[in-house]
Amino acid sequence: GNSVTQMEGPVTLSEEAFLTINCTYTATGYPSLFWYVQYPGEGLQLLLKATKADDKGSNKGFEATYRKETTSFHLEKGSVQVSDSAVYFCALRDTGFQKLVFGTGTRLLVSP
Amino acid sequence: DTAVSQTPKYLVTQMGNDKSIKCEQNLGHDTMYWYKQDSKKFLKIMFSYNNKELIINETVPNRFSPKSPDKAHLNLHINSLELGDSAVYFCASSQEPASSGNTIYFGEGSWLTVV
């Protein structure tokens, strides 16, 4: 079946540090890949997505590249801010399936 | 305007009660969902409707009954609430087909606490 594996959190960084949150997936077809973010006490927001191999999704300084050969979609940001503190979810939608399959989420804590 | 709106945002109720959460989307999408987020933040789909037809039902207890009066609304009714039903319930919507990588948009969540 389809699944998403994310690195365990929390990830604790100082402001302006480089961020990587690892995400790997298993899928039977040709999935689209997503990163969602949940700020404290809020709902889920789409951060970025990629729909085919080698696509790069980017938004608000975050980037992730769809790597079919390593079945990965790692999230990166060059310089994090305190306001980036949130839970980040990697997810996939496989071809022909309506539902999103989520990873377990990774909490990011950024200190000043 | 909020694209996917759900009410109430917070709900505290006693065991055994029946409650409903309402959801509406103004994006013109044809598919709507309910997801449950447990205390460890794990997100799992419960139901999906496409044009008012149930298409996904993921082994959810039959105390949970979704209802879609039209494709812009998907309500969730829960009978005989149990402590384990305490969670955040997210409504979402998307335009199909999934193969195009269409984004699923989420509401702000409904925080349900059963005491």
Image (cartoon, rainbow, N blue to C red):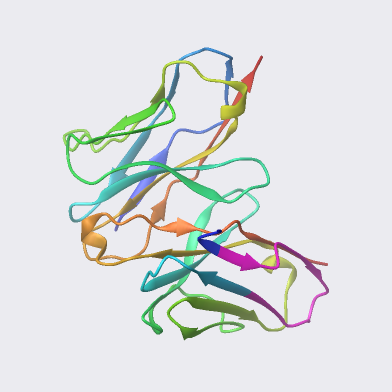
Could you tell me residue B61's position as x and y percent?
56, 79
The one nearer the camera, B83 or B47, is B47
Say which quadrant the C terminus of chain A sits in. Answer: top right
| Residue visible at 21% across and 60% down in the picture | B99
Between A47 and B26, the residue placed more toward the observer is B26
Q: Is residue B11 magenta?
A: yes
Q: Residue at x 32, y 31 (%)?
A: A64
Q: Residue at x 39, y 25 (%)?
A: A76
Q: Is residue A88 above or below residue A31?
A: above
Viewer-nearest residue: A28 or B54: B54
Residue A67 vs residue B67: left or right? left
- Location of the N terminus of chain A by quadrant is bottom left
- The image quadrant that residue A66 belongs to is top left
Q: Up-down: is B48 above or below A81?
A: below
Residue A101: in magenta span: no
Classify residue B37 by image quadrant: bottom right
Residue A15 lies, in percent from the top left, at 58, 14
In the picture, measured across the screen, residue A45 lies left or right of residue A85, that is: left
Magenta-colored span = B5-21
Q: Position of residue A101 (x, y in %)?
A: 39, 55
